[in-house]
């Protein structure tokens, strides 16, 4: 009773703080409370004092400026002191002992170790993924205090973190965490729960599949889809999956097809085949290509052959052929990457009728698929058919825009190097006498670009930065050329003279071979004229020089000269190939490298320092 | 590892307190240091990494050890032309002096750390004479030590600092004046009412925050800034008004008590500091060890075990705060170590860390206060925690919650007391009610409700603990009274079972 009274007073006091203490004078709500305080005050002095305070507050003289505020503060102070002594902490009602499910994890890591990871897991912003990966590698997650956060991470808005928690962090705790995940698992939930279920299925062993099945039946759509996919390969749920594949919801059927495809049972093949034939033809397609069942492949191939067989009858009927083409595409997707003797026959037949499919119908996808399949089979007939097909292409497309592009790419692996050269070299030699804006100049450029694409590969890829502490992995722009032996085997040697004449640095670099003095002097000149490591020319020139078999000391000198060139500034990271070459420099170059060090920044500086360090240790040892 | 900083930043000299004794036998390396020990010296984890990096990148061109094996020194290439000369002088084994010629204000800098790591890794350090510059510095330091020793021997060391009384008096008068200004502001805010507070008014509060500084009232600055934060934080207005009312009570108590204290001080011809209550700290006084000693607030040799650690950002102080809760092993009292790292200097200061060993301190300085006294110590040695220590910690746990709560409430009713006292409680068992709320139970069947009070949650971790960590254990808890719900709640920080201290926080 007295506590309620105090809380009531607290309410009124707060109200006055909000409204302003000047309104306290004569406040009727305070007046209403006063008798209770006076009554209780007869027994407890504290209430008496509070009562007096309240009375003083009500009777504040409007005239004196700060009186009301002071009196309100006095009441408030005393009231808070009293309230703080009245806190109740004990349980009301029945209690039972806490049933814990122990996780055998220590709690011995220090604050400094844990806090960075905790921050990464509980805040938003960039750089968190790296911290979490690092911590996982160092084993910091093997501390009880991080486990709940690792579970929370399944819900991280940054997908990479959520996926990493699902695929790596949580499974690393082993089966012990399954009871905890099961306890908090809410089948009706969203992405978090679906990821949780993934971990449960992965770590929980056979025992948890009851839960997975239950979730597949009654969870939210998101959870059901995950659960159904997880049931793949479990024979006891074969019938259930077959049933799910007849569900009303499209997403559920798709997940069931997916799981059936992964299971590969006979019943699965039958059901998928049925779906393919029925109205689910579209949504089952991705599952068909997943399914490795030879039965299914056989059936599909049979149908595919029949379909193509029916073609001549309707060939003049445009809408009919269009309809067949749509179906053909679905078969091509479903049978992609599959092998079957009947399929080989089918594709041979396609190549035999290359003119029909390629030129009359324009079914390039089918023709290409047939070629791809044949390339894998090593069938002699297949090969001669393909060569024949390409020869037809060369005639058909001569003078068109695809001649120097797609057709060249198609022909290169099939024709002999000499034949290919003879077919195309004219384009390059014509260029010499043509103006820069002419059609043949354009043609020549197309061909050179196509060739460059084929022999020089450029891409960003992971790269171990050996010069960094802990040898971090970073992403770097890589330039790579086809291996020299492949070029010698598959490309005519005469190309080199042409590309030299046309001043095409990348191709000269790629085609360069020992004993070609003209190429060497061309490349050395290029390196002298563009020594900047920040640009992508020096790299190509050096690659060519290595291919041309330039003597070690000559190459080293050229490299260091480039490094020393006054134009060679602003390089932030030396490209991998150049870096590799610089690492091979003999220690006698140390002084010259140290001298150029100030010109280089950030990673490039570190790389050069690393090279120097290696040189030093090579001197010492 | 607790490090006492020589506050002469700029000299880049630090006196460190080492936990590892250096064996004096011949034939083994004279200086024995481990990587973990070096880690603990580092001001932050980035410095650890940077120290290692220097070795990895081969920046150390020279590594030397003095002829008497007491000094490690070397040369480390930096960004400039001339290399830096880091050194570590172990002439006083438990107070090594680290120096470096680099401009970094981090102490010890990465170069010294790298030098030490190189040594710990077993890199070869060739014998060489100590460079002249370093030798001169060593000599000076030696003389300082000698002088100090002489003074101690003559009993001069404890000579009290001369206080300029007239200046102090002026300061006290200024503080009183500041309290009046503060009171005037608070009253005007209250008369006007929080409901109609506008940006202009908030600006006035902020101006007063600045003003309080010139009245030597740092404590008032903190409290006023806190009020400003509460009023501008947004969110649920109900909550804002509750917190504001609470903060008004605190400020009112502060003004009243502060004024009474300062007036009494003016009366006192000695103008002595109050050694009983925390009012001096509230007014912004930073106690110096010598003052604590003078006030008799220093205890003899004792052992401390850290039970929990936390670090948080206190926006109203504009400082990061590192808090360690320690048990004094001969009395069972729970003390608190506090390190403030002002935002502006946070980068240069060592972030404290959890400490897992027993700290043996020659002298323990205690601040005035209530339950969890702030303590400091200048140096310590350490040993590992053994079974007897664990048993003793458990014995000190309060067995009756009724008694414990009484003590806590006694502190809570003082508006200037710490609203979050920490205690070690005996827990017979842990129970849960129909709503899934968790309670601890003492030997008499009394219960206390658990709830997460700090930013880092710990209560749910109990679900993952084995039975031997939940039955018949000692639990370090922090209390809080929630005015609106009328609940007194505790959050578990650590559990001491039969074998070990299980840290739920840090």
Image (cartoon, coloured by chain):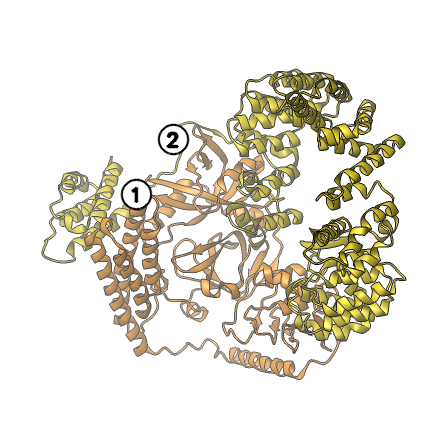
Chain colours: A yellow, B orange
Q: Nearer the viewer, mark 2 or mark 1?
A: 1
Spatial separation of the CA atoms under disc 2 and disc 1: 27 Å
Dot 2 and dot 1 within a common chain: no
* Chain under disc 1: B
**Of residues B341 and B75, which is closer to you in this image?**
B75
- The quarter of the image holding the C terminus of chain A is bottom right
Q: Determine the residue positioned at 33% across, 58% down.
A: B223
Which element type, helix, strand or loop, lies under badge 1? helix
- The quarter of the image holding the N terminus of chain A is top left
* Rendering coords of residue B472 (x, y %): 53, 38
Occupied quadrant, residue B36: bottom right
Q: Is residue A310 above or below residue B261?
A: above
* Rendering coords of residue A239 (x, y %): 65, 15
Q: Is residue A459 visible?
A: yes
Question: In the image, which disc is placed on residue A92?
Answer: 2
* Chain under disc 2: A
* Rendering coords of residue B32 (x, y %): 70, 65
Residue where numbered disc 1 is placed: B238
Q: Is residue B216 left or right of residue B365?
A: left
Occupied quadrant, residue A207: top right
């Amino acid at each position: 009773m007295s506590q309620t009274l105090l809380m009531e007073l607290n309410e009124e006091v707060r109200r006055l703080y909000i409204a302003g203490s000047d309104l306290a004078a004569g406040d009727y709500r305070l007046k209403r409370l006063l008798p209770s305080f006076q009554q209780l005050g007869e027994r407890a002095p504290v209430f008496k004092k509070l009562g007096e305070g309240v009375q003083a507050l009500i009777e504040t003289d409007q005239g004196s400026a700060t009186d009301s505020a002071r009196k309100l503060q006095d009441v408030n102070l005393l009231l808070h002191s009293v309230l703080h002594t009245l806190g109740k902490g004990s349980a009301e009602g029945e209690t039972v002992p806490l049933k814990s499910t122990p996780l055998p994890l220590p709690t011995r890591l220090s604050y400094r170790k844990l806090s960075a990871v905790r921050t990464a897991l509980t805040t938003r912003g960039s750089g968190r993924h790296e911290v979490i990966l690092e911590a996982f590698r160092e084993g910091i997650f093997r501390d009880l205090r991080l486990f709940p956060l690792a579970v929370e991470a399944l819900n991280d808005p940054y997908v990479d973190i959520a996926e990493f928690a699902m695929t790596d962090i949580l499974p690393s705790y082993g089966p012990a965490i399954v009871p905890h995940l099961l306890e908090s698992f809410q089948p009706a939930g969203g992405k978090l729960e679906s990821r949780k279920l993934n971990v449960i299925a992965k770590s929980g062993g056979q025992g948890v599949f009851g839960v997975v099945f239950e979730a597949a039946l009654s969870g939210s759509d998101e959870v059901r889809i995950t659960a159904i996919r997880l049931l793949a390969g479990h024979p006891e749920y074969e019938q259930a999956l077959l049933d799910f594949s007849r569900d009303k919801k499209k997403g559920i059927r798709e997940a069931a097809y997916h799981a059936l495809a992964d299971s590969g049972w006979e019943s699965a093949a039958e059901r998928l085949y049925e779906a393919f034939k029925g109205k689910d033809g579209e949504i089952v397609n991705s599952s068909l290509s997943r399914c490795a069942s030879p039965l299914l492949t056989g059936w599909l191939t049979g149908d595919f052959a029949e379909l193509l067989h029916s073609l001549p009858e309707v060939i003049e009927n445009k809408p009919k052929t269009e309809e067949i083409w749509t179906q053909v595409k679905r078969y091509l997707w479903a049978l992609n990457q599959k092998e079957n003797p009947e399929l080989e026959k089918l594709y041979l037949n396609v190549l035999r009728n290359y003119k029909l499919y390629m030129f009359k119908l324009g079914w390039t996808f089918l023709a290409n698929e047939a070629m791809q399949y044949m390339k894998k089979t090593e069938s002699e007939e297949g090969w001669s058919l393909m060569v024949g097909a390409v020869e037809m292409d060369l005639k058909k497309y001569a003078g068109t825009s695809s001649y120097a592009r797609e057709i060249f790419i198609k022909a290169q692996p099939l024709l002999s190097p000499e034949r290919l050269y003879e077919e195309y070299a004219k384009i390059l030699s014509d260029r010499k006498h043509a103006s820069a804006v002419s059609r043949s100049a354009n043609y020549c450029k197309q061909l050179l670009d196509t060739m460059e694409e084929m022999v020089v590969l450029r891409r960003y890829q992971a790269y171990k930065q050996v010069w960094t502490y802990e040898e971090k992995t970073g992403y770097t722009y890589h330039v790579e050329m086809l291996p020299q032996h492949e070029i010698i085997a598959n490309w005519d040697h005469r190309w080199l003279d042409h590309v030299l004449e046309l001043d095409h640095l990348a191709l000269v670099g790629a085609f360069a071979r020992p004993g070609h003095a003209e190429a060497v002097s061309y490349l050395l000149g290029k390196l002298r004229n563009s020594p900047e490591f920040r640009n992508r020319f020096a790299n190509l020139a050096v690659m060519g020089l290595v291919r041309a078999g330039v003597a070690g000391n000559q190459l080293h000198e050229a490299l260091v000269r480039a490094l020393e060139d006054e134009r060679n500034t602003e390089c932030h990271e030396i490209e991998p190939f150049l870096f590799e070459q610089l690492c091979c420099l003999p220690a006698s170059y140390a002084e010259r490298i140290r001298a150029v060090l100030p010109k280089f920044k950030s990673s490039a500086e570190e790389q050069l320092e690393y090279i120097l360090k290696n040189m030093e240790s090579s001197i010492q040892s | 590892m607790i490090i006492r900083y020589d506050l002469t930043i700029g000299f880049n000299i630090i006196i460190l307190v080492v936990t590892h004794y250096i064996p004096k036998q011949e034939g083994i390396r004279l200086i024995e240091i481990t990587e973990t020990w070096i880690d603990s010296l580092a001001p932050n984890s980035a410095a650890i990494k940077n120290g290692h990096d220097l070795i990895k990148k081969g920046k150390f061109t020279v590594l030397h050890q003095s002829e008497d094996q007491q000094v490690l020194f070397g040369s480390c290439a930096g960004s400039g032309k001339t290399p830096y000369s880091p050194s570590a002088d172990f002439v006083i084994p438990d107070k090594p002096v680290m120096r470096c010629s680099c401009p970094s204000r981090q102490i010890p800098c990465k170069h010294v750390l790298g030098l030490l790591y190189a040594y710990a890794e077993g890199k070869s350090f060739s014998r060489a004479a100590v460079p002249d510059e370093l030798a001169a510095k060593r000599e000076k330091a030696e003389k300082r030590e000698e002088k100090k020793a002489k003074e101690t021997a003559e009993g001069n060391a404890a000579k009290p600092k001369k206080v300029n009384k007239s200046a102090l008096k002026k300061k006290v008068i200024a503080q009183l004046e500041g309290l009046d200004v503060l009171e005037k502001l608070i009253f005007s805010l209250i008369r006007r009412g929080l409901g109609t507070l506008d940006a202009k008014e908030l600006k006035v509060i902020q101006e007063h925050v600045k003003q309080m500084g010139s009245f030597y009232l740092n404590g008032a600055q903190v409290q006023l800034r806190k009020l400003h934060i509460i009023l501008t934080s947004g969110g649920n207005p109900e909550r804002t008004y509750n917190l504001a009312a609470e903060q008004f009570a605190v400020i009112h108590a502060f003004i009243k008590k502060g004024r009474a204290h300062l007036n009494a001080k003016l009366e006192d011809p000695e103008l002595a500091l109050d050694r009983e209550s925390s009012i001096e700290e509230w007014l912004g006084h930073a106690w110096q060890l010598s003052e604590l000693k003078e006030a008799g607030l220093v205890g003899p040799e004792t052992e401390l075990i850290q039970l929990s650690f936390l670090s948080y950002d206190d926006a109203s102080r504009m400082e990061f705060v590192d808090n360690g809760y320690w048990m004094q092993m001969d009395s069972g009292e729970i003390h608190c170590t506090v390190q403030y790292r002002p935002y502006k200097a946070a980068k240069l200061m060592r972030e404290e860390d959890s400490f897992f060993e027993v700290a043996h301190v020659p002298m323990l300085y205690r601040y005035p206060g209530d339950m969890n006294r702030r303590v400091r110590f200048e140096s310590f040695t350490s040993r590992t925690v053994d079974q007897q220590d664990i048993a003793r910690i458990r014995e000190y746990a309060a067995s009756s919650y009724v008694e414990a709560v009484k003590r806590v409430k006694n502190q809570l009713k003082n508006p200037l007391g710490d609203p979050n006292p920490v205690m070690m409680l005996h827990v017979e068992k842990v129970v849960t009610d129909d709503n899934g709320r968790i309670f601890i139970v003492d030997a008499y069947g009394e219960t206390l409700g658990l709830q997460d009070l700090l930013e880092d949650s710990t209560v749910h971790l109990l679900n993952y603990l084995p039975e031997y960590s939940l039955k018949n254990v000692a639990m370090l808890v922090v209390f809080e009274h929630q005015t609106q719900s009328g609940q007194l709640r505790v959050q578990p920080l650590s559990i001491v079972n039969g074998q070990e201290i299980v840290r739920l926080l840090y």
